[in-house]
Image (cartoon, rainbow, N blue to C red):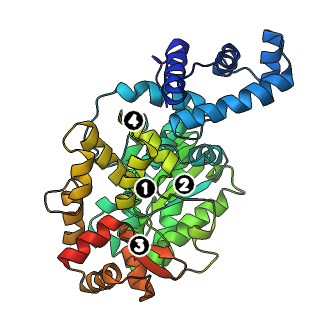
Amino acid sequence: MKNVQFDWPQAKKAAEKAVQSHFAENLKDVEILVLQGAWEGLTYEDMAEKYHLSLNYLRSDVGSKLWKKLSEAFGETVTKTNFKEALQRISSANTEIIFPSGSLPANSPFYIERGGLESQCYTTLDKPGSLIRIKAPRLMGKTSLVNRILDYGQTLGYRTVYLDLACVEGNILKDVDKLLRWLCFQVTRGLTLENKLKIYWDTEILGSNDNCTGYFEDYILPSVDGTLVLALDTIDRIFYHPAIIGDFFGMLRSWHEKGKTSASWQNLRLVLAHSTEAYIPLNINRSPFNAGFPVELTEFTPAQSKGLARLYKLGYTGEDLERIRSIIGGHPYLMQLTFYHLSTGQVTLNELLNNYAGETGIYRDHLREYLDILSDRAAEREALKQIVTADKALELDSMLMYKLHSLGLIEYEKDLVVPRSQLYRAYFNRVL
């Protein structure tokens, strides 16, 4: 997270305020010294020499306890590596609260870190030819994480291109040649390069995959003259087009493999985001879904939910948060939506709890969107009806369970499924 205006005095003030608010006590002088030393990039060895204190005391007695204290106060995991970003989020909590819509930008103060997953993604991105695979149902924060990965890449001087396959026209997805031409053109445009598809695309001799690979190898990668991060979001759209699955994903896997031996392909870093499992028949050696670094986004933990509530200036107790979580679980988007309405005074907690599945409740637009999606999916609609009316977990057709899980409406309990939340059970039990 980049913000040249955020300096040490602001960071110190944010830390002191959070600790005072959570523990009703002040940071100790030695804790402030360690925090400032870490802010300045000092190691514990440097601090011991600078402050004339024992190394073991600073590292074990002060440092270790300090990060645990800040983690509890902030409601997220805080370490010597990520504390600056955490402090900035806390400091920015007085930012104007806006209605949650779509993904969060990389510098959003309302982004909640997922237990160190972000740092793991950054470390992976630094590796030549790396591949990051982000998997989660819709509205779980995939694109928000992609935004932060790309932002981190930019801080390293990498060129970045983000493409959302949800925007691709249906007729393009039916033809692998059209899709790969679209891919090459969009990357070219994203890098503000001249479109040279007519020069490099030879349909008389080469197939579509070879043409696309050659275009990257001979034109795009040399033109970047450095590292290119290519993020492909909503790639599960391709799962429903069997005619292109093998060629497209086989090509991505081959690019990743080339990065292990080829200097030019090591400059390409891939970030793929999709909903749940890749339920597609692919040769194990041609699939990108068993390679690279896998990231699976889950719901917010109670501590992460508490941290988000604090960012919305809601000083809820554990009991109040548990009442909210009993309805929506730790669903990231619904948490944002809930805290927005509560923090702006548009609804009280009791009003929310008494009308959460109603046609005038705060979740009405979200629920109606799902109802609209299901309107022309009779099989999924009937399957969901069985799930929400059952008093125990069910086993249904695996493809139907996969599709409903991809939508984010259900969750697995081993090989069985249940509604993802009480909100979905109550609403769809009523309207289906």
Mark 1 and mark 2: Cα distance apart in space: 29 Å
Tell me which label, 1 or 4, sits earlier in the chain: 4
Mark drawn on residue 315: 4
Q: Name the residue under label 1.
A: 330
* C-alpha separation, residue under disc 2 versus residue under disc 4: 40 Å
Q: Earlier in the sequence, mark 2 or mark 4?
A: 2
User: Residue at 70% across / 57% down in the picture?
Assistant: 260
205 sits to left or right of 321: right
* Mark whose residue sits in front, 1 or 2: 1
Q: Nearer the viewer, mark 1 or mark 3?
A: 1
Q: Which amino acid does label 4 sit on?
A: Gly
Secondary structure type for disc 3: helix
| Relative height, residue 189 to residue 83 (above, below) | below
Q: Which amino acid does label 1 sit on?
A: Gly
Q: Nearer the viewer, residue 255 or 142?
A: 142
Residue tagged 3: 405
Question: Can the viewer see residue 70?
Answer: yes
Find disc 2 in the rendering and name its residue: 270
Label 1 to label 4, Cα distance in Å?
17 Å
**Which image quadrant is residue 316 in?**
top left
- Amino acid, disc 3: His
The mark closer to the camera, 4 or 3, is 4
